[in-house]
Image (spheres, rainbow, N blue to C red):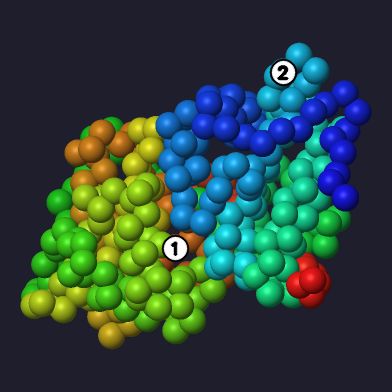
């Protein structure tokens, strides 16, 4: 049975024309939590271009009787039928009246249905929240989610030209080449972050399809570090709303502790500055990447907030 929205509100499917309203909603939440917003209509539309996300079926808006968008929720299949990512936002003026629990229940119901149709009985649902959003963290805990990781968000201003990178002898940087470097970069990431990281596709071919071919990816912001022809490190960056994001920075274990990570970080700062980014931003997991944390601090990055990640195994039931 389809859930009913709280009294006085209506729910409907999201449409591309709703991107500006969703951006305004999320911006209000970000400003209330952090004093600034970093979202736009264009960035919302980019998110809606993600692989395995169907706006017609995987996103919902909650509106007042006057048609004001006050809450939004969406899910995406990270691994078809097996792993789902979800996020929701509620306007600060409408906290505490049941919109968050309603959307979270709706999102889980959708994930169960998709998993059941795929023959998966126990899919995993993942989500995240700023630690400053106490209501969201409490909502996930009350719904049976467990906190699995906490990341530090770190930032560096790029108003002035960053220092020139210093590279170890024999190491040179170069741009990423689609179709040529895919497998090598996938190898760098899996070696650096573990043989079977949960947030990486299982094969290089899947990674190429999901990440390299993602229409949101700007491959001109991907940097490699090479020794001869061998790719030994990578920094994968993106740019949105005047902010540069270092999504991944990795060095193969056999080449670590030689200054390659610092070279990639400095090169990324330069590239993002030249593309008019105001700040460089990345996230590092607390208690796991201690050496990386120290590297980012030495490079002038400062901690700005904590981001908590949650997950829950939900029972989809047998396909009928």
Residue under pointer 2: 67
Residue 214 is drawn in which quadrant? bottom left
CA neighbours of label 2 inside 10 A, class few (<14), some (14 to 19), many (20+): few
Residue drawn at (91%, 28%) of the image: 7
Left or right placement of residue 222 versus residue 166 in this view: right
Residue 267, compared with residue 172, is above or below; it is: above
Q: Is residue 134 visible?
A: no
Q: Residue furthest right?
A: 7
As helix, strand or loop, the secondary structure at mark 2 comes to loop
Q: Which mark is residue 43?
A: none
As helix, strand or loop, the secondary structure at mark 1 comes to helix
Few, some or many C-alpha atoms within 10 Å of disc 1 (few <14, some 14-19, many ≥20)? many
- Circle nearer the N terminus (2, 1): 2
For image coordinates 37% across by 47% down, the residue present is 216
Q: Note whether 131 is above or below 229 in the view shown.
A: above
| Residue annotated with mark 1 | 293
User: Considering depth in this image, is 58 or 85 the residue closer to the camera?
Assistant: 58
Residue in view at x 63 percent, y 28 percent: 25
Q: Alpha-carbon distance for marks 2 and 1?
A: 45 Å
Quadrant of res 92? top right
Between 320 and 171, the one lying in front of the other is 320
């Amino acid at each position: 049975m389809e859930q009913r929205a709280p009294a006085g509100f209506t729910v409907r499917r999201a449409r591309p024309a709703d991107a500006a309203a969703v951006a305004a909603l999320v911006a209000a939440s970000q400003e209330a939590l952090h004093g600034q917003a970093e979202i736009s209509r264009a960035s919302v539309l980019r998110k809606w271009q993600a692989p395995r996300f169907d706006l017609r079926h995987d996103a919902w808006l909650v509106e007042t009787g006057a048609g004001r968008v006050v809450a939004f929720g969406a899910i995406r299949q990270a691994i078809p039928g097996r792993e789902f990512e979800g996020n929701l936002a509620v306007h600060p003026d409408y906290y505490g009246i049941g919109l968050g629990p309603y959307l979270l229940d709706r999102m889980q119901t959708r994930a169960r249905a998709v998993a059941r149709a795929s023959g998966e009985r126990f899919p995993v649902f993942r989500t995240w929240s700023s630690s400053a959003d106490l209501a969201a963290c409490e909502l996930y805990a009350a719904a049976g989610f467990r906190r699995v990781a906490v990341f530090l968000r770190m930032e560096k201003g790029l108003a002035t030209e960053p220092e020139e990178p210093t590279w170890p002898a024999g190491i040179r940087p170069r741009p990423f080449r689609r179709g040529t470097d895919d497998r090598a970069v996938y190898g760098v990431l899996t070696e650096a972050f573990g043989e079977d990281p949960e947030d990486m596709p299982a094969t290089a071919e899947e990674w190429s399809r999901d990440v390299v071919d993602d229409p949101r990816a700007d491959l001109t912001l991907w940097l490699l570090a090479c020794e001869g022809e061998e790719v030994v490190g990578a920094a994968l960056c993106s740019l949105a709303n005047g902010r540069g994001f270092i999504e991944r920075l990795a060095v193969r274990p056999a080449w670590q502790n030689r200054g390659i990570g610092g070279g990639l970080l400095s090169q990324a700062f330069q590239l993002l500055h030249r593309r008019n980014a105001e700040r460089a931003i990345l996230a590092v997991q607390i208690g796991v990447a201690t050496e990386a944390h120290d590297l980012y601090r030495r490079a002038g990055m400062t901690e700005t907030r904590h981001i908590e990640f949650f997950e829950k195994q939900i029972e989809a039931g047998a396909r009928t």
